[in-house]
Structures are given as structure tokens and as C-alpha cells.
Amino acid sequence: MLLAYKTALASPRVRAAAIEATEFPALADRMEVYAVPRIAVNGVPSWDGSVPESVFLDRILAPAFE
């Protein structure tokens, strides 16, 4: 999550938020959270788990997310 926050600070085009799945079970269900972290891009669940910074940036900058 820290990497998402850093990315949001670096770019006005990125917003980051962390949701505690146990406190918001309906949202966790809607976002299909089965592992943490669960990364969603443009409101679409995209991948699970931590990844290196270079992979994270490659994924959020991929043409499919534009």
C-alpha cells in the first residue's frame, strides 16, 4: 500500500486508498478480496499480493488501464 501512496503523491492522475476488509465486508466481497493486498485499478480488481516497484509501475502504466 505504501507504494500506491507514493505513486499517488507523485502523480495527480493517481489516487490511493486502503480499505480494511474486515471493517467493510460488503466492499471486500464486491472487490473479490481473497488475499491482501488486493490491487484495484480504475475500480477493477487487478492483482493480488505485493510486487516490486518496477512491476507495480509497469502494471498501472499498461495500456489496458488507460
Image: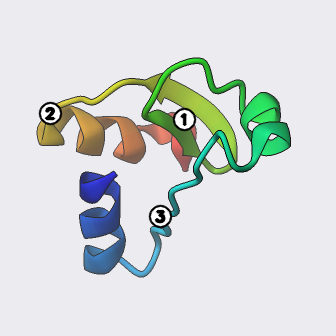
User: Which badge, 3 or 1, is on the more N-terminal residue?
Assistant: 3
Residue drawn at the location 28% of the way across and 30% of the way down: 50
Above or below, comparing residue 14 to residue 64 in the picture: below
Q: Closer to the camera, 14 or 3? A: 3
Task: Give the amino acid type for the residue marked by disc 2 in the picture.
Answer: Pro
Is label 3 in a helix, a strand or a loop?
A: loop
> Dot 1, crowdedness within 10 Å: few (<14), some or many (≥20)?
few
| Residue marked by disc 1 | 64
| Residue marked by disc 3 | 16
Task: Give the amino acid type for the residue marked by disc 3 in the picture.
Answer: Ala
Question: What is the quadrant of residue 32 in the picture?
Answer: top right
Where residue 20 appears, as percent x and y from the top left, is 58, 49
* Left or right: 4, with 30 as reference point: left
| Residues at marks 3 and 2, CA–CA distance in whole angstroms | 17 Å
Where residue 66 appears, as percent x and y from the top left, is 55, 50
User: Which badge, 3 or 2, is on the more N-terminal residue?
Assistant: 3
Is label 1 in a helix, a strand or a loop?
A: helix
Where residue 19 appears, as percent x and y from the top left, is 59, 53
| Residue marked by disc 2 | 52
